[in-house]
Image (spheres, rainbow, N blue to C red):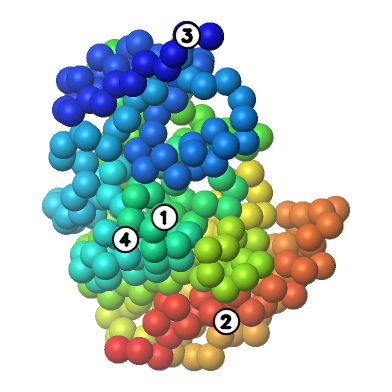
Amino acid sequence: MPPTELLAPRDQRELVAALARTTDASRLVAGATDWMLGRRAGGNPPDLLIDLSHLHGFRAVGCADRRIRVGALSTCSQLQCDPVLATHARCLAQAAARVGSVQIRNVATIGGNVANASPCADLVTALVALEATATVIDGAGRATERPIAQLFASAGGSALRRDEAILEFAFAGAHPDRRSGFAKLGVRSSVAVARLNAALVVDLDPDGATIAAARLAIGSLAPAAFLAGEVAAPLVGTRIDAACPEEFAHRCLRLVDERIPERSSRAYKRLAIRGLAADLWSAAGAGTP
């Protein structure tokens, strides 16, 4: 078997040239945390390995034109401490803080978390709630901006082509009073793969207390995280400083029944999602100025 060829592009031009050479057996890595686990499990090595970690210009978080832009090579450790996200997208910072261990967060990237397309990916759930878009470039040099949901196949896994790479994510961030939060349940308190996760984004009326718009994303109930509009819509008109509405928890429970009626984990998740709903309400800043 021929050895794996390694490419480490330093700029977008070199990246496009590398992507143009990919085959079905090629792989892209950034932090390589998921890829290393796969290699330990066995299987054939790739014919071409493209290391994205040397790319310049895709690690920044910034705000321009009333939108937040997050470079795909931003690490989870960077995101969890970023002041822009703390103000405009707290759910994404909280999700980043819950990924793996400190060592994993220091190298794992947001682009890799999305491209790996796990149904329980924490950052994906937050990005879905934020209605983020992703800028993707291919081996012909074409850059396109797509809604985050279009990066996932309907049956699970990634919808990215073999010659495509994610450059950055973007989402609206100009609302004067936006609250958001992320909550997660795993089989242990740390370094846990999510059995269930959720992100809530609410925009308040000028009075600063009444919800004008709400979005709820749920992970680990489908092949990819999804917006649960039937749960979030009734929040409009309620007060953010109230205790977690009982009806909100009931709607979350009904969502589990509808999405996984036959799955063996249904009984556990029916109970767990009620607590998750309360945690999510608190994580979104209920009752805080």
Viewer-nearest of discs 4 and 3:
3
Say which label, 2 or 1, has the lower sequence index.
1
Q: CA distance from mark 4 to mark 2?
A: 26 Å
Local secondary structure at mark 1: helix
Say which label, 4 or 3, has the lower sequence index.
3
The residue to which callout 2 is attached is 278
Q: Amino acid at mark 1?
A: Ile
Residue at the image position 28 percent from the left and 44 percent from the top: 73
Viewer-nearest of discs 4 and 2:
4
**Percent x, y of residue 102:** 39, 63
Answer left or right for 216 relative to 195: left
The residue to which callout 3 is attached is 2
**Percent x, y of residue 124:** 46, 51
Q: CA distance from mark 1 to mark 3?
A: 31 Å
Marks 2,3: beta carbons within 8 A? no
The residue to which callout 1 is attached is 104
Local secondary structure at mark 3: loop
Say which label, 4 or 2, has the lower sequence index.
4
Point out the image quarter for the C terminus.
bottom left
Does 16 sit above or below residue 83?
A: above
Residue at the image position 50 percent from the left and 79 percent from the top: 281
Q: Can the viewer see residue 109 in this picture?
A: yes
Q: Amino acid at mark 2?
A: Ala
Q: CA distance from mark 2 to mark 1?
A: 28 Å
Q: Amino acid at mark 3?
A: Pro
* Disc sitting over residue 209 in the figure: none
